[in-house]
Each structure stands twice: as C-alpha cells, then as structure tokens.
Image: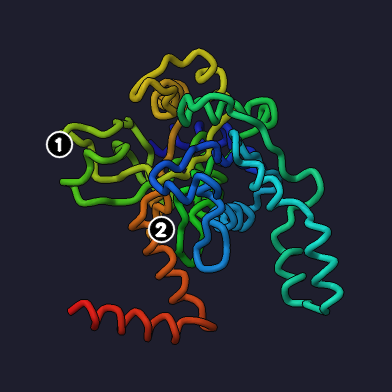
C-alpha cells in the first residue's frame, strides 16, 4: 500500500487557488422571503450566508472566486463590489469601523468572476458552467447552503490534505448509520493523513446497504478532468446532471481522498439549520452572547 501511495501522491497535487460557488438555486424552501432576497444573502447574525463560505475559502488560500449565478442573483454580484454612495456617507460621518468591515469583504480587482447557469439542470451542470474560468487547474467547490464552524476551516483542512494526497478530495462527516439513506455515502479505504482513500460512492443507499456512515458534506477539491465527463454526462436522479455520477466515473481513473471533518455544519438551506446557525454564531460572539443567551433561556422557560 505504501508504495502505491507514493506513486499516486503527486498526481493532481497542484495548489488550489480557484473556487466555485454554485449560487443559482431558487431557494423555494424559504419562500416568500427568497422571492426578493437570494437565499445566499439571508443573514446569519450580521453576515450573509455566502460571506461565511467565501471566508472559509479565503482561509484556505483561495485567490479567485467563481460564482455560478442565475436570474435574480445580481444582488450577489453587487455585494462583492464597491458601493460608492454608502462608502461616501460613512466617510462623511467618520464611521471608520463600518468602513473597515466593507473593505474586509471586498475581493481584489479581478478576483471574482460571475457566470450564468441559464437552466436549473443540477449541481453537475452548475460546475460545468465554470469550466472556462477554471481552466486546467484543480479547484475547490463549496456549496453555499452549508456553513461550517470549527477551529480550522473545513476547506483549509482539505487543502492541507490535498498537498499530501493529490487527486480529488471530498469532505465527509459521520452520521448515525440509520440515517445514511439520506446522504451521499463513501466507502472507506486506507488511512491518509486526516482522512482515508475513497473506494466507492453511493447516493442515498437503501437502508442497511450503506458501505459506511461517512456522508459527503458539501466541500470538494476536484481535478479539471471532471469537466470533460460532465460535458457528456446523462441526466440522473431528479432529471438533473448529478455531480456524484461524474465523480464515480472519474474515480475509475483518479484517486479520491476523504477529509474527515469534525466540526459543526449547518444546512442554511433548511429552516432548522438556518435558525441553529444563527443561534450558534450569535453565542460565539462576545459582544452579543450575554443578551442572546438570556433571551434564549427566557424563551425556553416560557415554553415549559
């Protein structure tokens, strides 16, 4: 095993400097709010969901951010741009702290790209729409509904593992075995750093047939060869072009490694996940924790 690993580890081990953020989804689970506000721009405490995901990418060393958008998502592009009127007003009022916040979220000129996914044909299709911007480099893929909370960011851990393993890296977490049928599940191989080699992937396996209880949590590092597969990928579940189907084909020729993420993940695309993310991140803020904690205790007491 050790010998084969040494042969594989340099394949596709280039630095990961680009990331794709598929933000074209309609957010129907949050209607009517998402009729006017994209789900990625809904706030957790005082930052849009998309900002948490971009911050995770920045921590991992990502330098170019590729947003795959759709109709009604122009506000995301505006968010990552200069707003002259607002900044002029803040300067006139000497609001230095607020100006500093705006400067901290602004990407460098040319570091953000936006491309359209004209039809809602699935995650695989959204990734394929970024092909010309990504080019021939390995790239990160971060699903914007999922925001992570840990001492070391999930993508940072993945990039560190990728430097050792090369190939493709997928973040996984453990779930209760009886819940495995809800997720994309990976089969486990040899241990590698903070993870293990992936030998197979199954999308929502029938109860009792799952190869493990490690599920894919929405973070990926992929090699550019995935684009060629997606170009001719037939539609799968939900009549959409599924990324998992394309990864299974790529698995025949390239190594896939799982990064075992051990922090907290909040699915902000679901109402309960969105609410819990607000609670968790609010309680992590020294400036508001006391007030929030007291109010939560009062609410819970009133419900008894």
Q: Is residue 177 left or right of residue 233?
A: left
Secondary structure found at label 1: loop
Q: Nearer the viewer, residue 83 or 51?
A: 83
Q: Which quadrant would the N terminus be assigned to in this image?
A: top left
In this view, the mark in front (2 or 1): 2
With respect to residue 46, does 170 lie above or below?
A: above
Q: Residue at coordinates 51% horizontally, 18% vertically from top-left?
A: 229
**Label 1 Cα neighbours within 10 Å, binned few <14 / some 14-19 / many ≥20:** few
- Residue 15 in view (yes/no): no
**Residue 208 spot, x, y in % from top left:** 13, 37
Q: Nearer the viewer, residue 11 or 171?
A: 171
Among numbered discs 2 and 1, the one appearing first in the sequence: 1
**Residue 9 spot, x, y in % from top left:** 52, 37
**Residue 126 spot, x, y in % from top left:** 54, 30
- Residue 98 in view (yes/no): yes
Cα distance between the residues tagged 2 and 1: 27 Å
Q: Residue at coordinates 46% horizontally, 21% vertically from top-left?
A: 253
Q: Residue at coordinates 53% horizontally, 60% vertically from top-left?
A: 43
Instruction: Return the residue at label 2.
Output: 274
Q: Nearer the viewer, residue 86 or 15?
A: 86
With respect to residue 65, does 123 lie above or below?
A: above
With respect to residue 179, does 300 lie above or below?
A: below
**Label 2 Cα neighbours within 10 Å, binned few <14 / some 14-19 / many ≥20:** many
Q: How many numbered badges does the structure rendering display?
A: 2
Determine the image quadrant of residue 283: bottom left
Q: Is residue 242 left or right of residue 180?
A: right
Instruction: Return the residue at label 1.
Output: 207
Q: Is residue 206 left or right of residue 129?
A: left
**Residue 186 spot, x, y in % from top left:** 31, 37
């Amino acid at each position: 095993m050790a010998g084969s690993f040494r042969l594989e580890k340099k394949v596709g081990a280039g630095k990961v400097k680009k990331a794709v953020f598929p933000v074209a989804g309609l957010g129907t689970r949050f209607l009517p709010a998402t009729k006017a506000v994209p789900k990625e721009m809904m706030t957790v405490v005082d930052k849009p969901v998309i900002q948490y995901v971009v911050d995770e990418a920045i921590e991992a060393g990502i330098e170019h951010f590729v947003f795959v958008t759709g109709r009604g998502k122009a506000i995301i592009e505006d968010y990552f741009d200069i707003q002259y009127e607002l900044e002029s007003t803040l300067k006139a009022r000497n609001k230095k702290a607020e100006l500093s916040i705006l400067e901290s979220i602004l990407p460098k000129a040319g570091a953000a790209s936006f491309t359209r996914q004209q039809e809602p044909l699935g995650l695989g299709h959204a990734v394929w729409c970024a092909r010309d911007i990504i080019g021939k480099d390995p790239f990160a893929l971060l699903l914007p509904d999922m925001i992570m909370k840990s001492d070391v960011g999930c993508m940072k851990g993945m990039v560190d593992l990728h430097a050792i393993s090369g190939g493709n890296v997928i973040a996984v977490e453990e779930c209760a075995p009886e819940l495995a049928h809800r997720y994309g599940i990976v089969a486990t191989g040899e241990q590698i750093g903070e993870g293990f080699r992936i030998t197979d992937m199954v999308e929502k396996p029938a109860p009792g047939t799952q190869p493990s209880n490690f599920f894919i949590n929405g973070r990926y590092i992929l090699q550019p060869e995935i684009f060629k597969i997606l170009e001719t990928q037939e539609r799968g579940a939900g009549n959409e072009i599924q990324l998992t189907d394309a990864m299974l084909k790529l698995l025949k020729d390239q190594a896939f490694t799982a990064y075992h993420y051990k922090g907290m993940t909040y699915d902000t695309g679901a109402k309960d996940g969105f609410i819990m993310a607000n609670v968790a991140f609010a309680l992590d803020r020294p400036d508001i924790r006391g007030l929030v904690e007291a109010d939560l205790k009062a609410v819970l007491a009133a419900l008894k």
